[in-house]
Image (tube, rainbow, N blue to C red):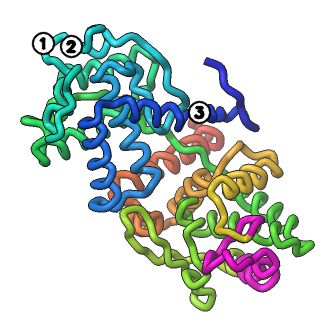
Amino acid sequence: MSSSTTRGGRGRRPADRRTDLRRLRAALPSGTATVVDQYERHLTSERGLSAHTVRAYVGDVVSLLAFVHGTDATGQDASEPGVEAAGVEAAGVDAAGVGTGGVDIAGADAADGGPALAGLDLEALRAWLGSQRNDGRSRTTLARRAASARTFTAWAADRGLLAVDPGLRLAAPKAHRTLPGTLRPEQAGEVMRASAAGAQQEDPVALRDHAMVELLYATGIRVSELCALDVDDVDLGNRLARVLGKGDKERMVPFGVPADTALRRWLDLGRGAVATGASGPALFLGARGGRVDPRTVRRVVHDAVESVSAADMGPHGLRHSAATHLLEGGADLRSVQELLGHATLATTQLYTHVTVERLKAIHDRTHPRAQ
């Protein structure tokens, strides 16, 4: 399946991806669709997950249930390109809409929700994952989708929509813990200097771009957190940013003098030039005066990194770089966890592998007895 690519070889997702998911969701039997709606409200209202996370979870569930009902057998979800057509036999469902285990799912559309999930058992979950493995999905993707399915079946069993929770017995391969790409400290410095040079003429957009790049690297915050910042969230006197992270958890993140300087210049010389009546309290604004969009931030970071011929990298790369440089500079793991807003220390520990790999490379290159 061909797709267009962006700079640096990054794949661009087909424009009809969400349309395909809407089509799959609309094709579900009404009772099953109602269950999906209830689950989406649970993720949004009760668990307080971000819109991006909810979209990914619901996309996985739509894929799973469409697979079980024989309308789709690929296991495509909201976080990956396209939705491909495939036969229904792999789902354990024959052409007549009857599960191979003898469960009639063609008429599984009762209003009480229980029959709407008929056929969703351990065999169906395994078949769903198996079809994706056969399609060449990575172990990381399979592990993530298995976790998503287990979250849904646990919720459904707790609500009485399933007699038992089949996800309790669902096993999946462990995801590969890949080392994140990072800039070296000197590369990061070059990126910041290039961004500052672009803002010297005091063009409002260039001032904004410089402030965003400096703040992302200085704090390690997520791109969604950066876009959500309001002017009052930044305490320039104490050089602190109040950030609302995942699960609506608030944290205070410090930043240094270069980011403070860039922010002051943006606020004093740039923001007023692009602000409109619709700008509200947003700290960073788009060209039309509204709150800046994450896609704009990603483009800005890609351009800034590319300008110094470093590896192609987006905002998450700056987050990885900030965490790695903090640890290499002597910061303890718990402090970095708090700064990044990680729910568990295990996520932060990934960065220790980066520093160890870098130390090994330095040792191999410099120590006379390394080889």
- Look at 68% across and 75% down and name the residue there: 259
Q: Which mark is residue 48?
A: none
Q: Residue 200, relative to residue 159: is it above or below? A: below
At label 1, the amino acid type is: Gly
At label 2, the amino acid type is: Val
Residue under label 3, please give it: 16
Measured from the top left, where is residue 202 in percent x and y?
A: 88, 75
- Look at 33% across and 36% down and name the residue there: 61
Q: Residue 274, relative to residue 30: is it above or below? A: below
The residues bearing labels 2 and 1 have C-alpha atoms spaced at a distance of: 7 Å
CB under 8 Å between discs 2 and 1:
yes
In terms of secondary structure, where does tag 1 sit? loop
Residue under label 1, please give it: 102
- Look at 17% across and 34% down and name the residue there: 110
Residue 264 within the segment the image draws in magenta: yes
**Earlier sequence position, callout 3 versus callout 1:** 3
Residue under label 2, please give it: 98
* Left-right relation of 346 to 242: left
Q: Quadrant of the N terminus?
A: top right
Q: Residue furthest bottom?
A: 237
**Earlier sequence position, callout 3 versus callout 2:** 3
At label 3, the amino acid type is: Asp
Task: Characterize the local packing of mark 1: few (<14), some (14-19) or many (20 or more) Cα atoms within 10 angstroms.
Answer: few
Task: Characterize the local packing of mark 3: few (<14), some (14-19) or many (20 or more) Cα atoms within 10 angstroms.
Answer: few
Q: Residue 276, relative to residue 87: is it above or below? A: below
**Residue 184 appearing in the image:** no
Which residues fall within the magenta stretch?
Answer: 262-288
Measured from the top left, where is residue 188 in percent x and y?
A: 70, 58
Measured from the top left, where is residue 81 in percent x and y?
A: 55, 31
Residue 174 within the segment the image draws in magenta: no
* Left-right relation of 50 to 329: left
